[in-house]
Image: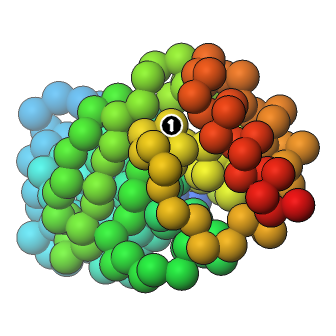
Amino acid sequence: MIKKGNYISAILRSGKTVFTFKDIALLWGDSGPAARVRLSYYIRKGELYSIRRGIYAKDKNYDRLECATRIFTPSYVSFETVLGQAGITFQYYGEIFSASYLTREITAGGQKYSYRKIKDICLTDKTGLENKGEYFMASPERAFLDTLYLNKNYHFDNLSVLDWDKVFEILPIYENKRMREEAEELCARTG
């Protein structure tokens, strides 16, 4: 149990910018009613920011990508968010796309989050995922395959940035013949 007066400093010292109630309870060593009262007090005082029910941040300058993976767990940032950053698609999307165990669209803290369901065996396999400290993000190759997995004949603007060896290294986790054929065809076209 933390000494009285040190509760907020335990959160502020953390490397995370986004917390669930469970994260805070672990930091404080207390998940009882007193912890909820204390949490409400810090939110009212403006020392913590409530993004949505059960999700909190140190302030309004929290990492939106980290938040995407805290709302639904397990999840990781992927699809158009990564494809756009890598220059594989040129269309801009203001929302953050993540792979998860369910399909949902929500808005939290003024940010739109889009979750797409992929099968559990793919979701929990870390092949092609990059550890960004407090969350995981798909590599461009993994995001390409995630997108191919959910979308037949998806239009990619620029596949020249992909490392095709990595694509074919990650591909077996999907156990999908159609994806293999489509990836081989796109690889041959890219040259």
Please, is residue 171 above or below residue 172 in the view? below
What amino acid is found at the position of numbered circle 1 in the picture?
A: Tyr
Residue 98 placed where, x, y %? 42, 50
Left or right, residue 159 beside residue 177: right
Residue at 10% x, 33% y is: 33
Q: Judge whether residue 38 can be spotted in this image.
A: no
- Quadrant location of residue 91? bottom left
Circle count: 1
Please, is residue 147 above or below residue 122 in the view? below
* On-image quarter of the C terminus: bottom right
- Quadrant location of residue 68? bottom left
Residue at 81% x, 36% y is: 168
Left or right, residue 156 beside residue 106: right
Mark 1 Cα within 10 Å, few/some/many (few <14, many 20+)?
some
Left or right, residue 48 beside residue 101: left
Left or right, residue 47 beside residue 91: left
Task: From the viewer's side, name the closer residue of 7 and 149.
Answer: 149
Residue at 57% x, 28% y is: 178
Please, is residue 1 above or below residue 7 in the view? above
Q: For numbered disc 1, what is the local secondary structure?
A: helix
Residue at 40% x, 58% y is: 97
Residue ID for mark 1: 149
* On-image quarter of the N terminus: top left
Residue 127 placed where, x, y %? 73, 33
Residue 41 placed where, x, y %? 12, 61
Q: Judge whether residue 57 can be spotted in this image.
A: yes
How are the residues colored? rainbow
